[in-house]
């Protein structure tokens, strides 16, 4: 079924491509990015212990992050019946139309994956991690087992993750970001700081550079009532496109940040 309209066709196709992938597995998302030019794929021995890193070509590159898994991943919820979601679209909203499915549409974080896919030729670095929903498994694997990539990541100008509910806020969590970085975000996006509670992959990844997680327009994540508003998703994508075209400045953290928390779940 063709859900997209001619306006913003490329963006709609990319978004619907990822929202249509099975929420029970991150394989298709990982494979999609692993096949891109210059992709570095790394996998460990534990479930969801993997990532795909595509180094940027710009000298002033930014690290762009999203996660491939959903909360309904079969590695963590094998008891959930494997009934696929059916993507519907009405009045600007994507949602699951299959009444037998007990899952949502996986907008957390397939919405972020779609943004990264559209930015694959931007010259900035792409990082797709697995296992975020169960304690940042993939990003912790990267940090521990691939110190050379971890060091390279922390030589970027800053990091942006696309894994946040709502339409216009951001979180830096407990990363010791500077006020200059927050002012930079608010001036370029017009989004508000949503506080420090909880965590996501940038909390593990950002040791020397500032990072923020941006709203991508989904609501009701982790429930069968999950939905995503296209205009809100497109708003963040459009704003980040405009920002990334500019010459970038580097935003180091206020201090070297060593995260010692290992078992929190993101929001």
Image (tube, helix red, strand yellow):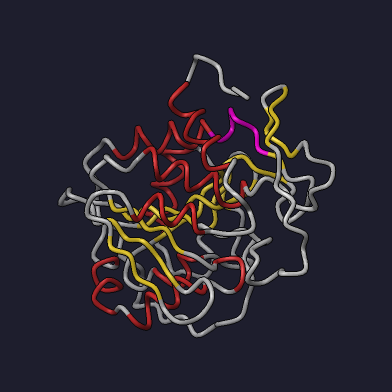
Residue at the extreme left: 59
Placement of the N terminus among the 4 image quadrants: top right
Q: Give the image location of residue 34, x and y in percent.
A: 34, 56
Q: Which residue is drawn at 55% across and 82% down?
A: 262
Residues drawn in magenta: 228-233
Magenta segment main secondary structure: helix
Residue at the extreme top: 6
Q: Check the image and report above or below for 22 versus 216.
A: below
Q: Tell me, yes or no, whether the highlighted magenta stretch contains residue 229.
A: yes
Q: Residue at x 73, y 45 (%)?
A: 226
Q: Give the image location of residue 44, x and y in percent.
A: 41, 78
User: How many marks can you see?
Assistant: 0
Q: Check the image and report above or below for 214 versus 75.
A: above
Q: Tell me, yes or no, whether the highlighted magenta stretch contains residue 64.
A: no
Q: In this view, does 192 lie to the left or right of 101?
A: left
In front: 31, or 15? 31
């Amino acid at each position: 079924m063709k859900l997209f309209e001619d306006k913003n066709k490329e963006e709609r196709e990319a978004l619907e491509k990822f929202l249509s992938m099975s929420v029970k597995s991150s394989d298709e998302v990982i494979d999609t990015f692993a096949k891109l030019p210059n992709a570095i794929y790394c996998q460990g021995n534990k479930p969801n212990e993997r990532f795909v890193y595509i180094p940027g070509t710009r000298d002033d590159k930014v690290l762009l992050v999203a996660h491939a898994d959903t909360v309904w991943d079969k590695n963590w919820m094998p008891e959930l019946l494997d009934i696929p979601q059916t993507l519907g679209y009405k009045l600007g909203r994507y949602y699951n139309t299959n009444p037998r499915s007990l899952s949502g549409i996986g907008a957390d974080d397939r919405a972020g994956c779609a943004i990264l896919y559209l930015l694959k030729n931007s010259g900035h670095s792409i990082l797709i991690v697995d296992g975020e929903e169960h304690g940042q498994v993939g990003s912790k694997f990267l940090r521990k087992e691939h110190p050379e990539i971890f060091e390279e990541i922390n030589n970027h100008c800053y990091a942006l993750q696309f894994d946040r509910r709502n339409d216009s806020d951001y979180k830096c969590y407990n990363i010791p970001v500077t006020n200059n970085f927050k002012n930079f975000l608010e001036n370029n996006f017009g989004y508000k700081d949503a506080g420090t509670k909880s965590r996501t992959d940038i909390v593990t990844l950002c040791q020397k550079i500032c990072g923020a997680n941006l709203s991508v327009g989904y609501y009701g994540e982790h429930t069968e009532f999950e939905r995503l508003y296209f205009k809100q998703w497109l708003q963040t994508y459009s704003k980040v496109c405009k920002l990334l075209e500019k010459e970038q400045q580097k935003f180091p953290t206020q201090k070297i940040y060593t995260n010692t928390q290992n078992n929190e779940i993101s929001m």
